[in-house]
Image (cartoon, grey):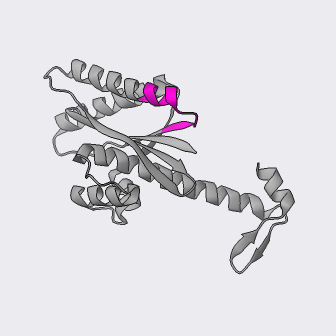
Amino acid sequence: MTIIIGIDPGSRMTGYGVIQQTGDKLTYIDAGTIRTDTKEMPERLKRIFNGLTRITQYHLKYANEPIYAAIEQVFMAENPDSALKLGQARGAAIAAMVALDLEVSEYTARQIKQAVCGYGAAAKEQVQEMVCRILSLDVVPQADAADGLACAICHAHSSHSMNKLLLNSSMRGRGASKKKGRWRLTEEDLGNLR
């Protein structure tokens, strides 16, 4: 079991979502938005850093599983000033995670939408709807919180696929047999994996 914190950075609103991954099963834990209602950019960055630090420390305190962080990469906006502010907010979020010794993975908006909706150019409403379906939520989360959850889901799918690939590649040289497209592990192989 692992816990994944997904972050959708923004200079005015930073969305976050926390899920638990147990094998193929994903479970909703928490989601929300850190609002920075001030004009001063240094104060906004401080609120993002402090907000994400508090949320992460809470989960570190009560979780016995490893915790990973995933964050959306900056896209190139038409307005350079907006892209710069978004990059600063993203830097504050990454700094908060790294200060707590968490491993941070980065995903593009297209990768996140592809992992959640199966379509890299999906609309925000589609992302919200699919997040609800994947996590069996009765209430649709706010758009930025849904994006944070989508980022966490993307990381869960990505890391789960990578683990399967690594497991399969390690089996090739160990005498595992392949029948009808599936690897069959011997008892010795299973013992070596534990």
Does residue 10 show up magenta in the picture?
no
Residue 69 placement (x, y as % from top left)? 46, 38
- Vertical position of residue 152 compared to residue 36: above or below: below
Dividing the picture into quadrants, the one containing residue 56 is top left
Numbered range of the magenta stretch: 56-68
Which part of the image, by quadrant, shows the N terminus?
top right
Q: In the picture provided, is 12 more to the left or to the right than 19?
A: left
- Vertical position of residue 66 compared to residue 26: above or below: above
Does residue 63 show up magenta in the picture?
yes
Q: Which residue shows up at 68% across the image and 77% down it?
A: 181
Q: Which residue shows up at 30% across the image and 48% down it?
A: 146
Q: In the picture provided, is 175 more to the left or to the right than 108?
A: right
Residue 111 placement (x, y as % from top left)? 39, 56
Dividing the picture into quadrants, the one containing residue 55 is top left
Q: Which residue shows up at 27% across the image and 62% down it?
A: 122
Residue 4 placement (x, y as % from top left)? 47, 42
Would residue 8 be visible to someone looking at this image? no
